[in-house]
Image: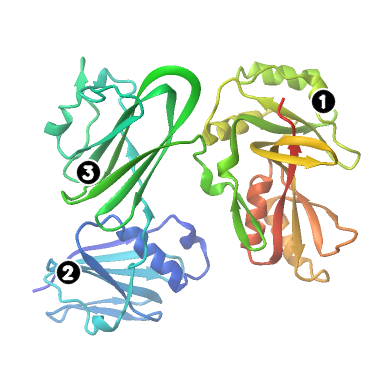
Amino acid sequence: MKQILLLLSLPLLSFFSLTAQITQQEADQIIIERLCNETGDFTIYAKEDVQTNFEIATSTGETIELAYPCWVYYADFNEETNGKYLIVKVSNGNLLEVNTKNDEGPEGVEEWRIIGEDIYPIDILFEEYSLEGTSCQWININTDMNCDSSHLIIINSHEELENYINCTEGAYPDIDFSTHTLLLTHGVECLLVVPTYTRLQQLSKQDYVINVYLGFEEISNITEWQVALIINKITDDTHIELNVLEGWCDCKDELFYYYQNEKLFIDSVFRNNYLFIGFDKQVPGEEIANDIAQTELFKPVDINKIIHGSNIEEYNYVLVNTINKKTCSQLKEIISLLENIPYIAFVSLTFTWEFWFGGEYADMMFYTDLFYVKVIDVNDLSDLYEVAQETNTQIIRQNEYTPTSFTLSADKNSLDNSLKMSQYFYETGKFVWAEPCFGFAQDY
């Protein structure tokens, strides 16, 4: 007899739930993301077309009727007697799950489309496990103290965890090992390092890789590091590879622009110690130098190196050098802090980029407030005005020699910075291309 164990409607807070109509490809992705952490061997079947008034029939004649257009899926856990129906609502991407037992699956399921066979690699969400603020510390790790060494310990019970943790007062932060596994990565470096970010990917049903990125300082100092991650419970036959890499850029997925219909990533040249600031021309250099100093985050600003904007530019500019190296996320937090200063219009990340122009050498690149958009039809600018209004970006001018090209500006009051806005405009599909305006300068 088939038993209906769970009937649950899950609103998905993702891109897909914001679109007007969910496509089959988007629905597939919703299902894959939902099931990517399921353990064991299973197959995902999909009905080919949108279903209306779909009925889930049980072996005893019971039915569940869905009176709305939906994409229908069935997950067959091959070595078990249970299955899972998954229904994605076409109108908003909401997900309905029906877990079953003693289920042979829907009639004719073998003729449904199979999805998920080529979904890997998948980025896996995790929760970082920290001992900060407790009386606890890690023990019995890094016992060899060899430089450039790294190790992974997989912990599946409190008994195992107690071999690696010691607390002088109170208990260690709790973990529910019935549903979770703790991955403890650790190592030793001969330079001063700080873990900057971590990425966990699933390569197959049983294979994972952890990439731990360390920010290196050119200071000789033996440093022990640890990064602990809580993930959904894994099986004993799971294989996890640990890679330790150098890197400060923990927001690499957003550092790109489109050029000739391709994504060009610039995360590999991210600079971890500079920001580029655009500010009101009426503000004296001494004032911005003083306000920057009050943050206690930057080296002194030399007002003689302020870049004065041309007559057609709205701002003056200055490069500021952080006292300590920062990750991309840390710099973004500092950007938010600086943009609270009323006369600062925008703040940008910077990148290493050697460049010669007109006999002048530059080794630093940054995006300004400007970006460029080419419209499809110069006689119909409705999309340009609509998206500009939607994003609170300003149309600055039309190109005199290429009338289909326009210059726009994104400041701190826009939806996002000019790099992100160039991505946004292009991804609407309403324009031929959209590209950021990069500036160049010499490190000082």
Residue type at mark 1 is Val
How far apart marks 3 and 2 lie (CA) works out to: 23 Å
CA neighbours of label 3 inside 10 A, class few (<14), some (14 to 19), many (20+): some
Circle 1/circle 2 CB separation < 8 Å: no
Residue type at mark 3 is His
How far apart marks 3 and 1 lie (CA) works out to: 55 Å
Residue drawn at the location 78% of the way across and 41% of the way down: 356
The residue at which mark 1 appears reads as 283
In the image, 188 versus 305, the foreground residue is: 188
Q: Is residue 395 visible?
A: yes
Quadrant showing the C terminus: top right
In this rendering, the answer to whether 283 lies above or below 169 is: below
CA neighbours of label 2 inside 10 A, class few (<14), some (14 to 19), many (20+): few
Residue drawn at the location 66% of the way across and 48% of the way down: 419
The residue at which mark 2 appears reads as 78
Residue drawn at the location 14% of the way across and 73% of the way down: 103
Q: Tell me which corner region of the image, top left, top right, bottom left or bottom right, holds residue 351.
A: top right
